[in-house]
Image (cartoon, grey):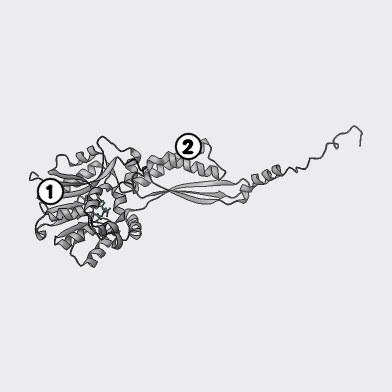
Amino acid sequence: MAPNDTSFSAAPPTPETDPERLERAILSRLLSWQTMRGEVTFPCIPALADRYTQQVQGLARTLGQPFDAAALERLRTLVAQRLEEGYAASPYSQLLVRYQTVPGPEPQLSWKVETVVVSSEQQARHFLRYRPPEVHDRYPDAKVEAIAATLGDPENAPILDVGAGPGRNAIALARRGHPVVAIEPNGAMAQQLRTMVERSGQTVQILERNILDGEFDLARDRYGAILLTGVVPYFDQVDQLRLLFQKLAPALRPGGLLLFDAFVGVEGWVPTRLVREWGRVTDAYPLAMSELAAAIAGLPLVLVSDEDALAYEREHLSPEARQARPWFDRWASASRLFQLPGDRVPPVSLRWRVYERSSQS
Ligand SMILES: C[S@@+](CC[C@H](N)C(=O)[O-])C[C@H]1O[C@@H](n2cnc3c(N)ncnc32)[C@H](O)[C@@H]1O
C-alpha cells in the first residue's frame, strides 16, 4: 500500500453513545411497531363541519400523523358532505370517523369518514330503554288536565292527542271519561302506547299515522280539544308547522281548544343555523316568535293563553307527579338546548299556548 494512499485512513464512524440521541432514534421507529385503531362519533350537525374537522386534526396530531394542508381540506369537504347526508336522512344520524394503522415500513394512518343513519324508530327504542314510561310517564301534564276540566261533560268532549308517545296524557284523559284518539307515527312508540293503554284498562283509539300524511284525513268539527304536547319541537320548517295547524283547526269544533307547547324565542331573537340544527337533533327545535306567528296567521284560531310551561307545571303539578318526572324541568328549562352559567337564562322558553277555534272556517 502506497504511503500517501489515504483511502483506508479515514477514521471509522464514531459510535453514538449519547443516551438522548439513542432514545430519539428508537422513538422515531416506534410508530412502525405500534398498531393504532379507533373511532369517534359526532352528531350529524352540518353547521359543525369545521369544528369536527379540527377535532379530527387534533386527534391525528396526537397520534403523530397530522394531515397536511391539502389532506385537511379534503377531510373538511368529506366531513361536510357526510354531515349533510346524515342530517337530511335523520336528525339522529351520526358521523363515524375511524382510523387505523396501515402496516408497512413507513407506517401510516388510514382514515374513513362515514354516515350512520339512526332512524326515528331506533332512536325511540333507545329512548324507551333509557326512560321507561312505566316509571317516568305515569303523570299527565297539569295544563292538559286543566284544559280537560273546562270541556264540560267528558263523554261529549272527544279529544285528539297528536304525537301521543307512550300515552301518559291520552290515558289520563280516557280515565276522565273522554273519548280519546291518539295518533303516533313512530312504530316503537306506538307499540309502547298500545302496551300502556292495555295495561291501563282504558279505551283509546290508536292510529299509527303521521299527522301530516296527505292521505290521512281528520273528521271536521269533531274534537273538543286537540293536544300537541312535546310535538311542535319536532317541526323545524315553518311551512310544515303551518300545514299541521291548517289540518288541525277544522277538526276542532267551534269553541274547541288547541293546546301545544313550543320553545319560543324572546322578541326579536332569531336562532342561528347551529341553534336550529342542534334544536332539531335534540327534539327541542326553537322557534322565533315571528315564525310561530307566521305558522298560525290567518287560521281560524284565536289565542286564549300563553304561559311559561315550566312555571305552570311547577305550580300546578302535585309533588308526587313532579318527583316522578324529573326530566320535565330539564326539558322545559331548555337546558337541553343551552347549558348557560347560573346568571344567564336561554333566549327561549317553553310556552303553553292555547287557541280556540273560531266559528269562521
Ligand atoms: C316528546 S314525544 C311527546 C309524547 C307525548 N305527547 C307526551 O307529551 O308525553 C313527541 C311525539 O311526537 C311524535 N311526532 C313527531 N312528529 C309527528 C308527526 N308528524 N305526526 C304525529 N306525531 C309526531 C313523535 O313520534 C313522538 O312520539
- Work out whether 117 lies above or below 80: below
Q: Earlier in the sequence, mark 1 or mark 2?
A: 2
Q: Which residue is mark 1?
A: 250
The residue at 35%/46% (across/down) is: 87
Q: Amino acid at mark 1?
A: Pro
Does dot 2 land on a helix, a strand or a loop? Answer: helix
- Work out whether 75 lies above or below 125: above
User: In which quadrant is the C terminus drawn?
Assistant: top left
The residue at 20%/45% (across/down) is: 307
Q: Which residue is mark 2?
A: 73
Label 2: few (<14), some (14–19) or many (≥20) C-alpha neighbours in 10 Å: few
Q: Quick check: can you spot residue 229? A: no
Looking at the image, the residue that sits furthest to the left is 359
Distance between mark 1 and mark 2 Cα atoms: 53 Å
User: In which quadrant is the N terminus drawn?
Assistant: top right
- Locate residue 238, reporting x and y percent: 24, 41
Q: Amino acid at mark 2?
A: Glu
Does dot 1 land on a helix, a strand or a loop? Answer: helix
